[in-house]
Image: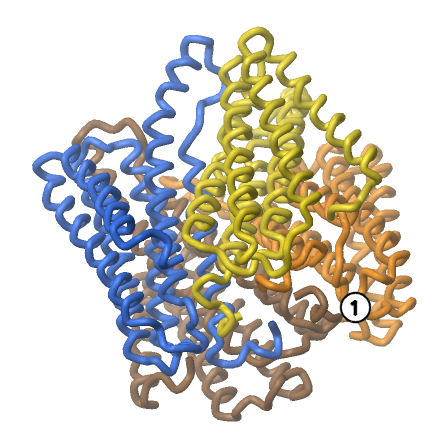
Chain colours: A yellow, B orange, C blue, D brown
Amino acid sequence: MGEHDAAGDPGRLLALSDGVFAIAVTLLVLDVGVRDGLDPAGFRRALRQTVPELLAYALSFTVIAAMWRDHRRIFAGVRRVDEVVIRLTVVGLGLVALMPFPTTLLADYGGRPQAVLIYSGAVVAVDAVHLWLLRYLASRPGMLAAPRPKAETRLLTADLTLTIAVFVLSMGLAYVSPTAAKWCWLLLVAVRLGLRWARGGRSAA
Amino acid sequence: MGEHDAAGDPGRLLALSDGVFAIAVTLLVLDVGVRDGLDPAGFRRALRQTVPELLAYALSFTVIAAMWRDHRRIFAGVRRVDEVVIRLTVVGLGLVALMPFPTTLLADYGGRPQAVLIYSGAVVAVDAVHLWLLRYLASRPGMLAAPRPKAETRLLTADLTLTIAVFVLSMGLAYVSPTAAKWCWLLLVAVRLGLRWARGGRSAA
Amino acid sequence: MGEHDAAGDPGRLLALSDGVFAIAVTLLVLDVGVRDGLDPAGFRRALRQTVPELLAYALSFTVIAAMWRDHRRIFAGVRRVDEVVIRLTVVGLGLVALMPFPTTLLADYGGRPQAVLIYSGAVVAVDAVHLWLLRYLASRPGMLAAPRPKAETRLLTADLTLTIAVFVLSMGLAYVSPTAAKWCWLLLVAVRLGLRWARGGRSAA
Amino acid sequence: MGEHDAAGDPGRLLALSDGVFAIAVTLLVLDVGVRDGLDPAGFRRALRQTVPELLAYALSFTVIAAMWRDHRRIFAGVRRVDEVVIRLTVVGLGLVALMPFPTTLLADYGGRPQAVLIYSGAVVAVDAVHLWLLRYLASRPGMLAAPRPKAETRLLTADLTLTIAVFVLSMGLAYVSPTAAKWCWLLLVAVRLGLRWARGGRSAA
């Protein structure tokens, strides 16, 4: 690495990013657990109570992993970063690293509108930063090793915009029905899978 | 890195993986400890109680390290990843990052069948994902820099299948005797060491 | 990596650094949260109490991210490190990894002079080590792949010196008024942004 | 990375190692802190009680950083690793990742012989593994990109042996006087600094 790590090289920015994503995703497990020293009946009850914790874990792992996949696609082929890219990336990482907080909130208070609101707000904020990064890089082809196919930029823009729209919608729904808001998220997964299937599969790794 | 990190480059996927493995393995230590402020007798008693915690730590460190070694062997020589590989890897990481939960369960409730069942289930799930990844890559030689020797694929398949079989067996045994189930795991170590020895040692780093 | 990682290669030192920065920054979230099992009124009250925690999170994320950006600029183009550089970097990392402690202190006891004093002291210590590293490398051009522009060294020196001066000043102010001391920090952000703007923007990524 | 990461490449082993060292060293801070909600007098008292915690933090950060520096020197120039090297490294990492446990023990029960004994034992175990790794690599020059100077191997062997000797000695002393045992460690720092000075400084980065 050393000698190639000139002023604009993205190597360390990506190393920091992968580190933050890896840790944010791994810290989620600290919310899953059974207290020590319970009697058999208490143990079985506590074990059943880990089910919503495991669901919140699975949801947030999926959400943060999807953010990482977007991040990876946004930075694919980038060979030079400037201060704007670094600042935007760092702000995005600050929001990603915060995700364990809304995740715990959702696991413990999933029925309260505020928990759904804060969770959705965090996702919207990360995806808005990623959308900004994508558009910024799209208008500066000199930062890429090879021009990015227009179709890939369009696809990523569509994916991020759709996710933002669904989570904003779920923020509105949260005050009517937190449960309906969460069904919105499942709808998103279905729509994205459907879209990918319609496009013919694994074109964009 | 920068300029080589094209769309299908595995660099960041491996960086994320190594990060998750490193953190999952290091978080295990949070379960080992002695409460502050004990009197001399309480301190000695608490110190003796760290022995099962240290055993659970050693077991899970060994298990997760073995998963990492499998992961490293599966990805050795891979120069291009597609969306299927990324998704499978991420699902595997989600299960690896969860390991501190069954580890704590085993340390605190090692005599309960459910703890042994959940622990074994988590190991089986990770190894099933790794087996899937291995078979997927084996059928797509274009993703590798050089064709992988058939013997290496066979060996890895055998190792993963054997581990899955033993842990599934221990899941069945757990309800009869959690202790017998755990002796199964030691048997696995003995068999794998024996197999390796029979094959003549360090052929596969 | 392997074959290039000769005795003086900075690769692993930077990998360790990025790891420590990523973890220090991600551990900050452990201070933000709402206790489980509250009634609706208690939940709303606890949620309001996360606001100062979120502010402390945002402040420390920004501060540590700024330290990382300085670190990245100091090591840009460095192709060889000696024992002095390694030791100074490790001391700096020890102080960066400590940051979650003054951050929690500030979130919980922001009105006490000692909290402001310890927080400022930690920032001053990290920046002093970074300044030392910068000057050490500036006087050993053989360690760099290409000579660093004098303007970049001057700029970084000015940024670090200004930050140290402001935080030392805030340490003095802390005993008069902890609040005034914290306004000092906002002043710093304004001055640095102003200076950057005056220089014409993104010259130094 | 991708295409170069052939079967014996040390890249991922070093990435895992740097990750584990970075996390072990950063988790140490979780032991330093002041409880929330204290009155002014309680706050000042709690703040004074962070002093031994900070000392234990500084000691363990220094110790783990020294282990990382040894690790980096042992692997400098290694371009191929076999299964023995991987297993030894993983065992070493398992011991490094455990260090937060003896560190907390020492911070909370520094006056008890057992705490000093366990702490010293952990250090001895890590350094013994590192010594084994060093000797193993020294006898297999084919694993290195260029032959390692004999003086460097001798120097590292001496450093590791000296550290092991001092910590074994302190284990013996622990039952006579835990305080004397800890003074032993300071003696080690003085001797190592003296030796380095006598050899003329930064020959070995």
D21 to the left or right of B204? left
Q: How many marks?
A: 1
B132 to the left or right of D83? right
Q: Is residue D199 above or below residue B132?
A: below
Q: Residue furthest bottom?
A: D150
User: Quarter of the image holding residue C132?
Assistant: bottom left
The residue lying at 52 percent from left, 87 percent from top is: D153
The residue lying at 15 percent from left, 44 percent from top is: C170
The residue lying at 37 percent from left, 37 percent from top is: C58
Instruction: Answer whether residue A117 is visible to the viewer in this image.
Output: yes
Nearer to us in this view, C191 or A178: C191
For mark 1, what is the residue?
A: B145
Q: Is residue D102 above or below residue C74?
A: above
Query: The residue under label 1 is which amino acid type?
Result: Ala
User: Quarter of the image holding residue D86?
Assistant: bottom right
Nearer to us in this view, A80 or B141: A80
Instruction: Answer whether residue D56 is visible to the viewer in this image.
Output: no
Q: Quadrant of the N terminus of chain C?
A: bottom right
C10 to the left or right of C88? right
Q: Position of residue B62 (x, y in %)?
A: 68, 56
Q: Is residue D83 above or below residue C31?
A: below
User: Quarter of the image holding residue B122?
Assistant: top right
